[in-house]
Image: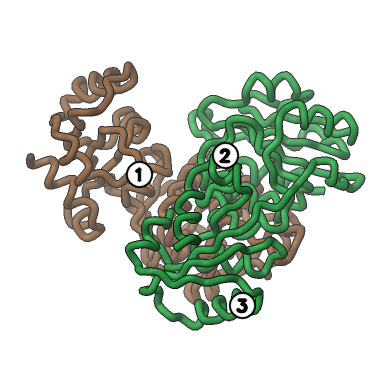
Chain colours: A green, B brown
């Protein structure tokens, strides 16, 4: 029962931060975790999980990695689950230690800053997109949902496990940007249309909340603002879609 | 209590299709609905909904439109609600009658076909994106989630109410495409990289399920396949992000 109470406890951000652990739930998320170098503390299986071939393969993979697996009653599993339609498997992993000082940037580099983004599904989708477009690191700035929230982990489809995603303070970023010769651009509806200006060799793109826009901290650091033209002024874009369009456009 | 049982009933696709009604839930969705020409049958308010200035303005707007409003106990409201954190307001609207024969395409036009897309959040985000990039109409092909599902309506942020979004059969599409001189392109990971080829003046882009890809029906109709290059072959894109990138690229 120890893994179960741990998994329940990790539903709270404070517990994740204190223990440096997180939960990956669902077959896909646990598969991605099992295939990654991230350390796995243990896995929980619901007694009622259907023994699909895929789940059998996954159990075998976890066994090969010597991961402790506990089978528990469905009722208990549900108490630790965070999904609408639980698939009966979750694993507890160790949050990888990541420091900005370990990031080695290529000559042409892209960094992504998440400025007070709240929606876990959007943030997870953005991590997945950043990994796909060769972003060197994605930093969650103050006010952003915890990157290791189970919903973020699920939506990112494994991006957490190999993409350098971490939270950071603005002073961390200031030091990083200064030492690495990075220019910060803010995404903003009133900015210059994307495509008009060549991006710098090393670009940190800041994306903010759909409703409230960039924070004062982000604005004051942006040397340029960039926007995506839309057909009607009324219509705005979802932040994950907008970030995808910009990262695709700016890919190194 | 009649509105309440209607709202509950409309949680089922069959009921929505039979009655040509749908539910918009939450302040933002009801605001968008109230500002649109779509007919509103009635609104439900939870007795415990906080009387924010925004909600007061919205109630007044509904009153001006002579929309019947019923205040009901929170328990009852929750039984009709479809959200994780209900905001205490929902409205029932009439699904607009839309026919492909009424679509007037400009010389350069974009049409979007959703090929068996299941996730309501993704489909709603895609409708919002299509409206933002000047797509003439978005058609939900067989196997796609009902466009009037409450989650789709919420994620689309009002796009349903002015963008021509409707379900269609492949034979509807065949007739439409032939009569309007539209070429169908499929989005597919093995297709030619986007940007290599000029799109036709009138393009119907088909986007499919992330896991299983385009259906045989979609494949057989595509005269060209287009893909988005990613940094690592492993990493795939979320379908709403991929669609956003393609619609942005192909915007007329």
**Dot label at residue A239:** 2
Q: Is residue B243 visible?
A: no
Separation of marks 2 and 1 at Cα, in angstroms: 20 Å
Chain of the residue where label 1 is placed in the rendered structure? B
Reading the image, the residue beneath label 1 is B84
> What is the crowding at mark 3: few (fewer than 14 residues within 10 Å), some, or many (at least 20)?
some
* Residue at 62%, 23% in the rendered image: A215
Q: Quadrant of the N terminus of chain A?
A: bottom left
Q: Is label 1 on the same chain as label 3?
A: no
- Above or below, B243 against B218 in this view is above
- When asked about the image quadrant of residue B193, the answer is bottom right
Q: Relative to A219, is A77 on the left or the right?
A: left
> What is the crowding at mark 1: few (fewer than 14 residues within 10 Å), some, or many (at least 20)?
few
Residue at disc 1, secondary structure: loop
Of the image marks 2 and 3, the number of the one nearer the N terminus: 3
Q: How many marks?
A: 3
Residue A243 point in image, percent of width and height:
64, 42
Reading the image, the residue beneath label 3 is A61
Q: Is residue A164 visible?
A: yes
Residue A65 point in image, percent of width and height:
66, 74
């Amino acid at each position: 029962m120890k893994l179960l109470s741990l998994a329940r406890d990790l539903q709270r951000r404070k517990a994740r931060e204190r223990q440096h652990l997180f939960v990956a739930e669902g077959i896909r998320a646990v598969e991605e975790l099992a295939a990654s170098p991230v350390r796995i503390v243990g896995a929980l299986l619901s007694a009622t999980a259907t023994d699909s071939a895929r789940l059998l393969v996954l159990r075998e993979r976890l066994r090969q990695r010597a991961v402790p697996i506990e089978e528990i009653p469905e009722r208990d599993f549900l108490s630790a689950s965070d999904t609408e339609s639980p698939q009966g498997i979750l694993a507890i992993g160790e949050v990888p230690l990541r420091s900005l000082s370990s990031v080695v940037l290529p000559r042409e580099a892209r960094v992504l800053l998440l400025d007070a983004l709240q929606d876990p599904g959007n943030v997870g989708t953005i991590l997945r997109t950043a990994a796909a477009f060769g972003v060197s690191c994605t930093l969650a700035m103050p006010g952003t949902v915890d990157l290791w929230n189970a919903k973020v982990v699920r939506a990112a489809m494994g991006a957490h496990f190999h993409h350098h995603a971490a939270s950071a303070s603005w002073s961390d970023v200031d030091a990083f940007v200064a030492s690495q010769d990075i220019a910060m651009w803010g995404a903003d509806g009133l900015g210059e249309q994307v495509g008009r200006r060549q991006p710098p060799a090393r670009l940190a793109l800041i994306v903010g909340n759909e409703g409230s826009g960039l924070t004062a901290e982000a604005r004051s650091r942006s040397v340029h603002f960039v926007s995506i033209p839309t057909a009607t002024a009324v219509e705005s874009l979802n932040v994950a879609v907008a970030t995808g369009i910009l990262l695709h456009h700016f890919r190194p």
